[in-house]
Image: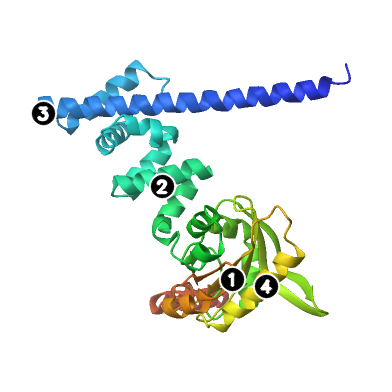
């Protein structure tokens, strides 16, 4: 084989895969358009002819009989097609967002959300971030649209445009740590270790673009050792992000400590092409006024947000009835052993 054969083959493979992705997207958009057209036709017939729900059942049987190799013509799916066309009466919307998502994503948007504004917002986020259906449902159920951009920050004053707007939208409040198996009485080090252990879920909660650098990241300043709870690099913002974890409410002195950390990372780690380092203080609770006062005159970009831990301890305790059933089972086993 010629020397450049491997390179040539790799380029061909990349081109074929790219064409496959484009073809799959085109097929998906055609399918979504077909489902919308079927749903709109059903709606029109029901409105014009007064057709009832029994017609959909008959339609499902006839379509499956005519197209046995095509899945998707069940009675429930035809009902979703009708709901899809009813939800998005303007075909132009299909070109902008929802038409680019798989059908099961669209079913989740219809089932889980009540307004078109929210459906279109989550649809756009799913496209931007490449969310699977399960991740889309998780983001909806964790109320991402309300949490995004809610942290107290000084970004408007300390970051240039458009980085300040982007950074504000990327920082949430509160952060949901429901995926952890720790109690609310856990210490900060336990929270940090749990987050590192579940780093995949933690990155999902942080959002797209976060790259994990390390925990208890060591810095030396004037001969003294300091350790950052968590250090990330954000690929879109092109900057380091320092996270300080607190299991208490926010106290103003936390901002001074974070200011020190951010300055040290800027001096020791930041590359000339990097944007200014951002600090994120994650507390159990916060007073918005105290947080705003603490950040007002600082020249380093810092955000203060809260975290929400799982309320699992109470739920995990057995009820009286469960204890009685367990006790009866133990007594029954003991009596059975004695008889043998």
Q: Position of residue 205 (x, y in %)?
A: 53, 58
Helix, strand or loop for disc 2: helix
User: Is label 1 or label 2 in front?
Assistant: 1
Residue position for label 4? 261
Q: Say whether disc 1 or disc 2 marks the residue closer to the N-terminus.
A: 2
Task: Give me the C-alpha separation between circle 4 and circle 2.
Answer: 35 Å
User: Is label 3 or label 1 in front?
Assistant: 1
Total numbered labels? 4
User: Is label 4 or label 2 in front?
Assistant: 4
Residue position for label 3? 50
Helix, strand or loop for disc 1: loop
Q: Position of residue 266 (x, y in %)?
A: 70, 65
Q: Say whether disc 2 or disc 3 marks the residue closer to the N-terminus.
A: 3
Q: Is residue 319 visible?
A: yes
Task: Give me the C-alpha separation between circle 2 and circle 3.
Answer: 34 Å
Is the residue marked by circle 1 packed among few (<14), some (14-19), or many (20+) residues within 10 Å?
some
Residue position for label 2? 122
Quadrant placement of the C terminus: bottom right
Helix, strand or loop for disc 4: helix
Q: Position of residue 124 (x, y in %)?
A: 43, 43
Is the residue marked by circle 2 packed among few (<14), some (14-19), or many (20+) residues within 10 Å?
many
Q: Say whether disc 3 or disc 4 marks the residue closer to the N-terminus.
A: 3
Task: Give me the C-alpha separation between circle 3 and circle 1.
Answer: 66 Å
Q: Is residue 76 left or right of 253 when viewed as pictured?
A: left
Q: Is residue 10 left or right of 199 when viewed as pictured?
A: right
Seen in the picture, residue 141 relative to 217 is either above or below; the reply is: above
Circles 2 and 3: CB atoms closer than 8 Å: no
Which residue lies at the image location 53% right of the left edge and 23% below the top edge? 23
Residue position for label 1? 299
Quadrant placement of the N terminus: top right
Is the residue marked by circle 3 packed among few (<14), some (14-19), or many (20+) residues within 10 Å?
few
Q: Position of residue 120 (x, y in %)?
A: 36, 43
């Amino acid at each position: 084989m010629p020397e450049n054969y491997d390179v040539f083959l790799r380029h061909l493979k990349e081109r074929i895969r790219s064409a496959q992705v484009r073809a799959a997207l085109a097929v998906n958009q055609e399918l979504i358009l077909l489902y919308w057209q079927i749903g709109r036709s059903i709606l029109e017939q029901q409105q014009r002819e007064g057709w009832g729900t029994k017609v959909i059942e008959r339609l499902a049987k006839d379509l499956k009989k005519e197209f046995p190799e095509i899945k998707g013509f069940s009675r429930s799916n035809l009902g979703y097609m009708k709901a899809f066309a009813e939800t998005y009466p303007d075909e132009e919307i299909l070109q902008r967002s929802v038409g680019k998502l798989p059908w099961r994503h669209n079913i989740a948007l219809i089932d889980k959300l009540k307004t078109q504004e929210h459906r279109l917002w989550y649809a756009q986020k799913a496209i931007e971030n490449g969310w699977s259906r399960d991740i889309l449902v998780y983001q909806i159920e964790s109320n991402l649209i309300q949490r995004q951009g809610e942290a107290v920050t000084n970004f408007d004053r300390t970051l240039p445009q458009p980085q300040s707007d982007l950074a504000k939208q990327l920082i949430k409040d509160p952060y949901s740590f429901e995926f952890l198996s720790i109690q609310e009485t856990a210490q900060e080090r336990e929270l940090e270790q749990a987050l590192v252990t579940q780093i995949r879920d933690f990155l999902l909660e942080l959002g797209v673009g976060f790259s994990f650098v390390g925990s208890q990241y060591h810095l030396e300043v004037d001969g003294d050792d300091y350790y950052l709870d968590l250090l990330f690099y954000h690929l879109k913002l092109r900057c380091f992000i320092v996270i300080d974890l607190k299991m208490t409410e926010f106290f103003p002195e936390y901002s001074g400590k974070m200011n020190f950390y951010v300055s040290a990372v800027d001096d020791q780690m930041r590359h000339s092409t990097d944007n200014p380092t951002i600090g994120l203080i994650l507390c159990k609770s916060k007073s918005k006024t105290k947080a705003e006062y603490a950040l007002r005159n600082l020249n380093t970009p810092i955000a203060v947000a809260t975290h929400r831990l799982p309320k699992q301890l109470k739920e995990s305790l057995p009820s009286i009835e469960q204890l009685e059933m367990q006790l009866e089972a133990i007594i029954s086993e003991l009596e059975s052993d004695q008889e043998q």
